[in-house]
Image (tube, coloured by chain):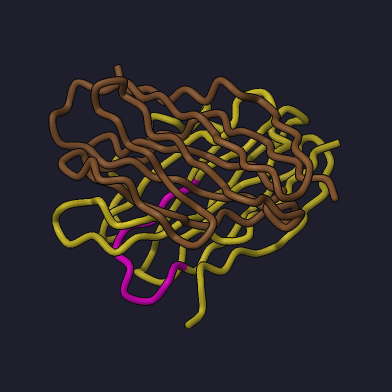
Chain colours: A brown, B yellow
Amino acid sequence: AQKVTQAQTEISVVEKEDVTLDCVYETRDTTYYLFWYKQPPSGELVFLIRRNSFDEQNEISGRYSWNFQKSTSSFNFTITASQVVDSAVYFCALLNTDKLIFGTGTRLQVFP
Amino acid sequence: DAGVIQSPRHEVTEMGQEVTLRCKPISGHNSLFWYRQTMMRGLELLIYFNNNVPIDDSGMPEDRFSAKMPNASFSTLKIQPSEPRDSAVYFCASRRDRGNYNSPLHFGNGTRLTVT
C-alpha cells in the first residue's frame, strides 16, 4: 500500500531554533516522487520541493533542507534558525502513479 | 501568472441545499484535481481529471457529490443535497502533465464550506 506517515502532529519551537519535520513513506514502486507542501494560516497550499527516488542527495534552499534516505524510507525536512513566518502546517506527499497521497501534516508553531 | 482560481472563498448553506464550487485551472495545465480537507481525515483526493476526462473518482464520498469539467479552463464540484458532514475546505489543484505525472500540483486558495 502507498502511505505517508507524519508522526509529529504538532511542534512548537522558539524563534531561531532548528526544527526537523519527519516523513516516512511506504511504496512498492522502484521509481517514485516525494513532495513537501506548506499551508500557512491563510490556508493556501504552497509547493516547496519535489524529489525523485533516484536522487538521494540532500537539498538545501536557504534555511530549508531536506534529507532523503531510501534505506529508512524517510524524507525529512529541516528548518534552520526558524522564524515566526515559518508557522504553518507542513505536508509530505507521495506520488502514487498519477495522484498525490498526502500525510496528515505537522503543525509547526514558532514563537517569538 | 494567474494561479488556480476557486470560487467562492466561503460558502455557508443550510442542510439540503445544493452547493456548487468552481475552479479555473492554470492555463496550459491538463490535469485537475479536487481535494477535501477536514481535521479528521486530512487531505483527501475526491476526483481527478486529465484532458477534461474523469480518470479516478474513487474518492467521491457518495452519489450526492458530482464533478464536471466541460472544458480545459473550468470545473465544478456539486453537492446535492448538502449535509453538515460535508463541511470542509475544498481545494482545486492543477498540473501540467507531460507523460510522467511528476510535476507539482498547484493549488487554489480553497473554498471553505459550512453546512448548517
Q: Does B30 appear in magenta?
A: yes
**Residue A47 % position (x, y):** 47, 56
Residue B37 x %, y % = 62, 38
Residue A3 vs residue B74, the one in the foreground: A3
In this view, B46 is above or below A8: below
Rendered residue at 27%/42% (across/down) = A33
Residue visible at 69% across and 33% down? B86
Instruction: Residue B29: say if magenta.
Output: yes
Q: Report the predominant secondary structure element of the magenta stretch.
A: loop
| Residue B96 position within the rendered picture, expressed as x and y whole percent measured from the top left | 29, 64
Q: Quadrant of residue B32?
A: bottom left
Camera-nearest residue between A7 and B89: A7
- Residue drawn 29% across the image and 57% down it: B103
Residue B27 lies left or right of residue B79; in this view the side is left
| Residues in magenta, as a range | B25-34
Residue furthest to the bottom in view is: B1
The image quadrant where one finds the C terminus of chain B is: top right
Is B7 placed above or below A7 here?
below
Nearer-the-camera pick, A2 or A107: A107
Residue at x-position 40% and y-position 55%: A60
